[in-house]
Structure formats: C-alpha cells, structure tokens
Amino acid sequence: MANLRSPRFQLLLVLQVLMLIQSKVLCYQYKVGDLDAWGIPTSTNPQVYTKWSKTHEFKMGDSLLFLYPPSQDSVVQVTAQAYTSCNLKDPILYMNNGNSLFNFTSLGNFYFTSGEPGRCQKNQKLHISFGNGSAYSPSYGPSALPDSAPSYPTVFGTIPAPPSSAPSQSFPVLMVAVIGFVVCSLLSGNL
C-alpha cells in the first residue's frame, strides 16, 4: 500500500488537482474593442466594434468588460430595433460605473451602445451574436435569432456553471478522474 505522506504521492496528488482545476477554467473576459477605453471610434477606424466582434468567438459564461470614464459615458443593452435606430429610451440594461461587466448567460444576439446621446450615431455600438458561430453587424444580413436577447439581471455576479450534458467540458473531468484512479492504483500496488 502506498504511503500517503510520501513526497512522491503528494506530488502526484497536487498534479491531479491542478489538472482538474485547469479543465474547469473555460470562461474568458474580453475587453471590448481591445482599446484603452469604450469610446467613439476614430475616423480612421469607424467600424472598430463591428470588426472586433467578428474576430472573437464567445461562449456561454464569457463576459464583456467595458472600460470608460463614468462621468463621461455609460453602456446600455438595447433591442435590435433600438440598436439600428440609436434609440436610447427603455434600455434592457443600463451600466454606468466605468468598469462594466456583462456576463453571457444565454445564446443569441446582444446589442450594446453608449448611453450618451449622439454617440450611437457615431458608431459607438456593439453587436454580439453567438450560438450560431458568427458575429456580425446588422448591415451584413438579417438575423435568424430573436431581436432581443435576455441579459444578465445584474451588472456583476457569478458566472453560471456549464450544462452537465456538454461532452466537450465533461471529457477532461472524466479523463482526470481515470488518470487519478490509475495513478492511485499503481501506487497502492493493485495494478
């Protein structure tokens, strides 16, 4: 039988725990636009947010981070119609703390714009579409998904656990469990 206090056994146990932790980290936080701040696009790159959303693939549990001076700007989540017409009345979600985090808790289309009048017309807006493998601007074609998408009920909160039936996420956990069983059996001399 293996000595549970031996350095070799403890090292293997630590490695197994690290593999298990590594297999569960699947969510990412994206800084919107990869810019210094959420703001009005420059004249040299007026479609910066449209281009940015096309270069990222989002997953359930990922989040968007909007950085901006809270005294000068805000972020609102709106419907598709409000996004297209730059209508800021009755937003789905209003964030104004300068360090706003939006968590994806469902698949679909998500529309964001600045909460300051006039900035949406200057292309300070973002459309994220995921679950169908693409992110695009409404000018590139109609959407097959609903015009509005549910938002996270609060600005900050916990990231939801992934569905237990997702095979791509449960396989690493199963693999780590099997490897751990084999290592423990080898150390105890049962294999």
Image (spheres, rainbow, N blue to C red):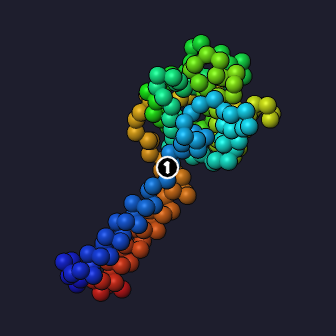
In the image, farthest residue toward the top: 89
Q: Where is residue 14, by image quadrant?
A: bottom left
* Residue 121: image location, x then y, percent: 70, 21
Quarter of the figure with the N terminus: bottom left
Q: Is residue 166 visible?
A: yes
CA neighbours of label 1 inside 10 A, class few (<14), some (14 to 19), many (20+):
some
88 relative position to 2: left or right: right
Residue at 30% from the left image edge and 72% from the top image edge: 13
60 relative position to 119: left or right: left
Which one is nearer the viewer's eye here, 44 or 191? Answer: 44
* Residue 94: image location, x then y, percent: 50, 22
In this rendering, is residue 149 above or below 53?
Answer: above
Which one is nearer the viewer's eye here, 18 or 166? Answer: 18
* Residue 171: image location, x then y, percent: 51, 62
Quarter of the figure with the C terminus: bottom left
145 relative position to 166: left or right: right
Q: Where is residue 142, by image quadrant?
A: top right
The amino acid at mark 1 is Cys
In this rendering, is residue 146 above or below 16?
Answer: above
Residue at 35% from the left image edge and 71% from the top image edge: 15
Q: Is residue 163 visible?
A: no
Tell me the element at label 1. Answer: loop
In this rendering, is residue 156 above or below 80?
Answer: below
* Residue 182: image location, x then y, percent: 38, 78
Circle 1 residue:
27
Residue at 54% from the left image edge and 52% from the top image edge: 166
Residue at 45% from the left image edge and 65% from the top image edge: 174
Which one is nearer the viewer's eye here, 188 or 157? Answer: 157
